[in-house]
Amino acid sequence: MLNSIAVLIDADNASAKTIGTVLQKIQTLGNITTKKIYGDWSQSNLNGWQEAILRHAIEPMQQFAYVKGKNATDIALVIEAMDLLHSGDYDGFCLVSSDSDFASLA
């Protein structure tokens, strides 16, 4: 069992409706010590996340979409993942997304 797991969530490509179940499953693998979710919170399509963020104590990370159609949120998540990895504080990582762009990070 892992001692410390960082959970990084792509709000654009994950479901707020199922995040409770996802977090319960991850918790069976170890202790979740960091939960962060990435998105442009000024966009109305992410409004459904507010209740889940509060209920599950997920830290929202703002990433403005400076140019429409670019993946600024994905890049922010990848940079955070690499920073956390190099901190040495985590035994495992969980990326929550349906976006195949994270395959090389995984």
Image (cartoon, grey):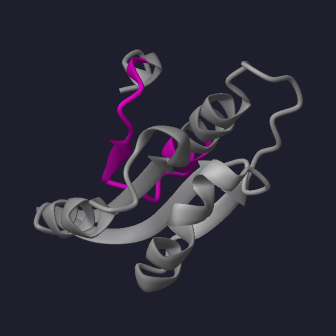
> How many numbered badges does the structure rendering display?
0
Left or right: residue 23 versus residue 11 is left
Query: Does 49 appear above or below 45?
Result: below
Task: Give x and y (percent) for residue 52.
Answer: 44, 73
User: Residue 33, position in %: x, y?
Assistant: 40, 71
Residue reaching furthest to the front: 44
Kindly give the residue lying farthest to the right in the view shown.
66
Q: Quadrant of residue 71?
A: top right
- Is 35 in the magenta? no
Query: Is 75 displayed left or right of 52 in the figure?
Result: right
**Hey, which quadrant is residue 14 in on the image?**
top left
Q: Quick check: is 94 in the magenta stretch? A: yes
Residue in view at x 52 percent, y 64 percent: 49
The boundaries of the magenta stretch are 83-100
Residue 39 vertical placement versus 49 (above, below): above
Residue at x 18%, y 70% (from the top left corner): 24
The answer to whether residue 18 is left or right of residue 41 is: left
Which one is in front, 77 or 91?
77
In the picture, which quadrant includes the C terminus?
top left
Residue 27's spot in the image, x, y percent? 19, 69
**In the foreground, 44 or 33:** 44
Left or right of residue 72, residue 55 in this image: left
Identify the residue at image location x=62%, y=44%.
Answer: 80
Which residue is found at the position 69% from the left and 54% from the top?
A: 44
Q: Position of residue 19 (x, y in %)?
A: 32, 62
Q: Quadrant of the N terminus?
A: bottom left
